[in-house]
Image: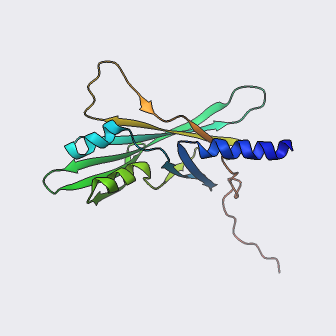
Amino acid sequence: MSNWLAILLAAAVSASAPLTLETELDKGTLTVEFQLQESLPEFLEAALPSGAAVEVNYQVRVRSKRKAWWDKKVWKGDATASSIFDPVTGRYNCGLVLDGVIVSSREVESSDEALAWLANPGVVRFAMPEGLRESSLAIRVRAVFSSSTKWLFFPDTEGTEWVEMPIAADPAGGAEDAPDKTEG
């Protein structure tokens, strides 16, 4: 009975999560796909046609689970999806920047396509540092919304709650592929 209750509780929590996550750890590369389940804030949708830079910063944190102490943050990265309206061409320039490096970019025709890009920028790959290929890793991700039209003297952060899920262990175990050896 309690097993079914735990499954139902986990399903209810995941159904109300603001982000959906899919992860894969393979040979030291963490592949993450996140998709925003909530609608974007109204100030972002209003700022998009004005030519302002509209961004959704996906903050990624990898933690090592411990039994006797709080979770240790072992690595962090940022993936920023952005969209800017170009009034000369009448198109939206969309880009995805991963830790300061442009990963992908494209132009779209409508504001609906630009909003879809911000909510689902695609798959990103993070190079994990050596020694983080243990089986007790978890990932935390949240989305932080920003627009260049906000004029505040005090920092303001509007975003989603953190979403956490375990990362499957590296199937290669962090070992390099060894050449096949045949004995004759």
Identity of the residue furthest to the bottom in this view = 184
Instruction: Check the image and report above or below for 66 versus 55.
Output: above
Q: Quadrant of the N terminus?
A: top right
- x and y percentages locating residue 159 in the rendered image: 45, 34
Q: Is residue 161 left or right of residue 109?
A: right
Question: Looking at the image, can residue 145 be seen?
Answer: yes
Q: Residue at x 70, y 58 (%)?
A: 171
Instruction: Look at 69% across and 51% down and name the residue there.
Output: 168
What scheme was used to colour the molecule? rainbow
Residue 128 position, x and y percent, is 57, 46
Q: Compared to 175, does 99 lie above or below?
A: above
Tell whether 148 sits left or right of 175.
left
Count of marks, rendered view: 0
Farthest residue to the top: give it. Answer: 154
Q: Residue at x 31, y 43 (%)?
A: 45
Closest to the observer, 90 or 82:
90
Look at 26% across and 40% down and name the residue there: 47
Q: Is residue 130 visible?
A: no
Figure quadrant of the C terminus: bottom right
| Closest to the observer, 85 or 12 | 12
Left or right side of 105 for 98: right
Q: Position of residue 167 (x, y in %)?
A: 66, 47
Residue farthest left in this picture: 88
Left or right? Give the position of 161 relative to 85: right
Specify the quadrant of the image occupied by residue 179: bottom right
User: Of residues 127 and 168, which is closer to you in this image?
Assistant: 168
Q: Position of residue 132 (x, y in %)?
A: 65, 43
Quarter residue 155 falls in: top left
